[in-house]
Every structure is written in structure tokens, then in C-alpha cells.
Image (cartoon, grey):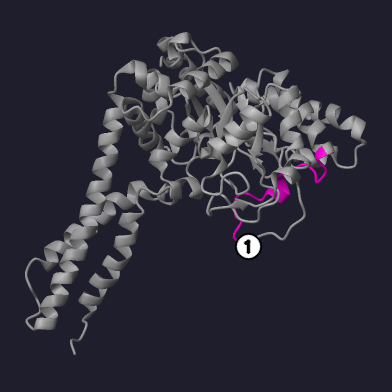
Amino acid sequence: MTRITLRQGLLWGGVLTALPLAYLLRNPLMTQWRSAATPMLCVFAVSALLGLRMPRWQSAPGMRQHSVLFVLWLSVLFIVATEEGLFQWHKHQVLHHPAPDAQVLGAHIIIGYSHPEEVKSLVSQGLVGGIFIGTNTMKGKTTGAIAAEVAELQTLRKKTGLGPLLVSTDQEGGIVARMSPPLSATPPLADIIAGAPSQDIEALAFAYGQDHGRGLSALGVNVNFAPLADLSIPRARSRLDFHSLIAQRAIDTNPHRVSPAVIGYAHGLEAQGVLATLKHFPGLGRVTADTHLFRVTLSSSQNTLEKSDWIPFREGLQSTQSLLMVGHATLSAVDANNPASLSSKVVQGIVRNRWGHDGVLVTDDMAMAPVVRHGMCEAGVDAINAGIDLLLVSYDTDQYYTIMHCLLQAKTGGRLHDKQLLASGHRLQKAFGLPGRLLNTP
């Protein structure tokens, strides 16, 4: 029996930790650690390989162990180098792709960022349709600094001749308020209408939305990913729900109270030049898992949802200029194989055809578990082909290049449906005043 020395144990422990990290390096879960983990894994792998280049164990079992360790550490280096190399190549191809096609497709993507330098090149080349201002963007900045930053990006956008940049955020009030601070924190809309007579809800929500709109408009924001149209349906909370927390964010259990609330709030934002977004269709009120981390299934029948959960979505879209955010829950009664955001059966079959809605649809953040499991590259293509207009890439900026590269390849290869792309371009043109040259030509 071969004894394992301390050095050998460290090499085994290191490689068994490094391999899964290398494999997950481009996963959105690694976003915060990727920039540090990439060079660190390379250094560790090279150091281990240099230490293993000369056999230290003379026995046959020792030599086998040496060979296995060498191959495993070499695999770590190969995986990291390959993943980073492919990413850099895709990024290079996106940044140097001929402008017409790249700008047509870029108009369908909203990208988040931590520092303006990350997106200046994309904005100045017209390779994105909008930006998302999140907590990382706001960190340590005053309202004046944010307003100046947005104004600079809009100036860069104006030089492209592509119309105004969509500037979005997620300012619901309550526990989700990406721009507080520096904007003042506000209670959730649920608190504003709690106990109010039904006839007063819309007016209360309007005043609340108008207050939000003033603050957002002053900073240059023109799209807010609020309000929630999901119902607050009593259910046991999953211990693994760290992010969605719909029960804490939803407005009410009664759809006939939620409808006037979302309509009033949307009109309040609109009065200040900001568009609202009803989210997260087909509804997260009945699901218990967190779509950020898990594949989530909404198993209720269409009939049940039409008579309850979908009332605020349908009435809100009919009465306002709001966008509709399509979430990543799987609506099993309609399409058990795909998240709603990537499903033509859901988007076309329900929203476009049954409801007759021809407004702008945006995905929830693409860096969520159901999309990652589907395949980030193909997800962008499937979403556009399903009838989605805007892809939100707010959390992991690097995923933009993966999605955009795949869209460019799909366009060249004829896998993007020209009819859907053209219809989507017209919707964006109507809603945001984009120029005609951003429309796809079949």
C-alpha cells in the first residue's frame, strides 16, 4: 500500500478543487470571482505541473499516481485556457463584426455593468440597445455622478445616430430598490395600498409611481422593471429561495386589487417619462423554488391562470404602455420542455395571439439557472425566435459576448427567423423611436 505524503495530499486536494472551478469558470455563479480565479488557477496548475515534471515516486503505484496527477493538473490548465481563449475570441468577433448586422442584433440586448468603461465601447459602436443600472453600478456614487454617467453614455449613443439608449433599472420599492441609495428608500407598493378601498387603489398607486418616476427620470432612467404583477399567493416558503422572495414583494393576493395598482403605478411612471414593466409572466406567485438557482415549473392549468394570476398582466398591458417581462418558469400546461422566456408556445400562443398584444417583451435576467441549463448561447436565439424583443443581461456582463456572438452566427446561418426579427424591430422602433436602419431586412 502506497503512503500518501503531505505534498501528495495537497496536490490531490488542490486538483480536485481546481477541476470543478475550471469547469464552472464561465458560469454566472462565478461572476464575482472569475477575474481573480482565472489567473489563480493558471498559476496553481503551472506550479503543480512544474513540480510534477520529474517523477518523485519510484514504485509502480507511485508512478501511476504521479501520472494521474499530471494529467489532472494539465486538464485544469487546458480547460481554463480553452474557456478563456474562446471567450476572448468571441469578444473580438463581436467587437469587430460589420456594423449593420451587429447593430440590428445589438438593439435587442440590455446589458448591466459595474463601471462605465465596461460598456462605453459597446454603446459607442451601437452594439447594445440599452443599459441596466444595478446595485454594483450605483455603489459609492451620488445622484449627480450617476446622472453625468448616463448623460455621457447617451452622448456616445447619439453619435451613432441610433436613437436614445434604453436606460433601465429595478426600482420596485421595499426589498428591491437598486437605486436606493442614493435615491430615498420607499415602502413596497403593497404597503401603499394595504387596507385601501378598491376605488382608491389606482390613485394611490399613481402618486407612488409618479414619485418613483421623478427620481428615476432625474437620473436619466427611462425604463423601470417594476411593478410586480405576480400574485401574493399564500404558500410555504422554500428555504432555498434566496432571491425571488415573491411573497415579500407581491402587491396582493386578489388580482382585482393588483390590477388597479399596477395600472396606477405604470401611469405614474409614464407621467414622468419612464416606462413600467409588468413582471414576471406567466407568474411566480404559485411557484416555491427560486428561478435564479433552479429549474422552476408552474403546473397550474391555463384556465386557472387566465381567471386569476394573469388578470393583472392582461389588464395592465391593455391599459398602459408597459413592457412585459417574461420569466424563466416553465409553464408545463403549454410547454413542458422550455422556460416561458424561450417558448414560442407561451410567447406567441398566449401573449401575441390569444391576447393580441404587440408591445415590447423583455426577458428576466438571462444569467439564471433555467437559461444556463438550456444553454446560454442558444437561449438568445430561441428567445428572439419565440417573439421576445429584449434580452436582459444585467448580472454577468461577460455573457453578453456569448449571446451576441451566437446571435451573429445564427443570423449568418439562417437560424434566426427574419419574420420575428423584423416584427421585433418594428415594436422597438414604435416604443423607443429607433431608426429604420435597425430593422432587419428579410
Residue 376's spot in the image, x, y percent?
41, 42
Task: Give the extent of the magenta segment.
Answer: 239-255
Rendered-image quadrant of the N terminus? bottom left
Q: Nearer the viewer, residue 281 or 58?
A: 281
The residue positioned 15% from the left and 62% from the top of the image is 49
Q: Is residue 191 magenta?
A: no
Q: Is residue 163 left or right of residue 246?
A: left
Rendered-image quadrant of the C terminus? top left
- Using the rendered view, name the quadrant where residue 259 is placed: top right
Q: Is residue 287 left or right of residue 111?
A: right
- Is 282 located above or below residue 245 in the figure? above
Q: Nearer the viewer, residue 306 or 147?
A: 306
**Label total for image:** 1
- Using the rendered view, name the quadrant where residue 339 is placed: top right
The residue type indicated by label 1 comes to Arg
The residue positioned 28% from the left and 67% from the top of the image is 14
Residue 152's spot in the image, x, y percent?
47, 18
- Is 176 located above or below residue 373 in the figure? above
Residue tagged 1: 239
